[in-house]
Image: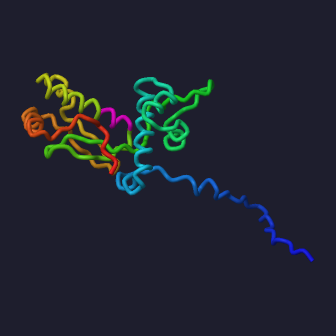
Amino acid sequence: MKRRKHQRRPILGKKRRSTRHARGKRPAPHTADELFSKPKRSQEAWIRATQVVTRIRTKQESLQKASREEGIAPRTVIRLAGSSLRKRPNGRYTAKTSDRLLRVLVIPTNKGSDEIAIRDSRQATLLAEYWIAVHRYLQTGDASSIEKFRGKSITEASGKRISLVTDLDELNRLGNAGAFSFESLYARAS
């Protein structure tokens, strides 16, 4: 006599959700603590994916080229940062005008520089433009580019506002003390 496996009867009126995809999908980080609590490999993948989106938006590069330059597979970028990409009718991906992906960036402060979490690509762009202006001022002494940042601030993911340092004496002091590193705007994955 053969034994039959117990079969579940479908519940009428309710759809069953597959848990297969839910297990493999990890939610996107919303804070720096969430990002840095992930394994180092996941942190690096997230940072690279956000950099690919930035390259697609600012340099008008294709997903394939930007991914190759950042050292990450295009499908990984789509999986991690797909919400900030738009697929065109011809099958190519372009970046949306702005996104809400988490970026942990370095910002100049009165004490040197600090890492902050930003969830708005426009704030990240403002911070990048500010860093360029600070670097230009410290290299050439041209303060005209710093002036447009007077009174402006950056809003962190938590909602806290951080004023940009525009006092030239303070910038000179910090620059002479070696408090700024211009290697990368992005914070190091820890």
Residue 153, picture quadrant: top left
Residue 99, given in percent of the width and then of the height, sits at: 44, 38
Depth check: 83 or 61 in front? 61
Residue beneath the point at 18% across and 32% down: 150
The count of marks equals 0
Q: In the figure, is residue 27 to the left or right of 91?
A: left
Instruction: Identify the image quadrant of residue 185.
Output: top left
58 displayed left or right of 3: left
Question: In the rendered structure, does residue 75 fall within the stretch colored magenta?
Answer: no
Q: Main secondary structure of the magenta part?
A: helix
Classify the position of the N terminus by image quarter.
bottom right
Which residue is at 44% across, 44% downward? 45
Name the one closer to the observer, 3 or 120.
Answer: 3
Q: Measured along the vertical axis of the image, is residue 145 above or below residue 174? A: above
Q: Is residue 4 above or below residue 35?
A: below
Residue 129 in percent (x, y) is at 27, 29
Residue reaching furthest to the bottom: 1
* Residue pictured at 39% horizontal, 57% vertical: 37
Q: Tell me if 113 is positioned left or right of 61 in this view.
A: left
Res 3 → quadrant: bottom right
Q: How is the image coloured?
A: rainbow
Query: Residue 57 at x, y = what percent?
Result: 43, 28
The span shown in magenta is: 121-126
156 relative to 15 in the view: left or right: left
Relative height, residue 104 to residue 12 (above, below) = above
Image coordinates of residue 158 in percent, x first then y, are: 33, 51
Query: Considering depth in this image, is 161 or 56 the residue closer to the camera?
Result: 56
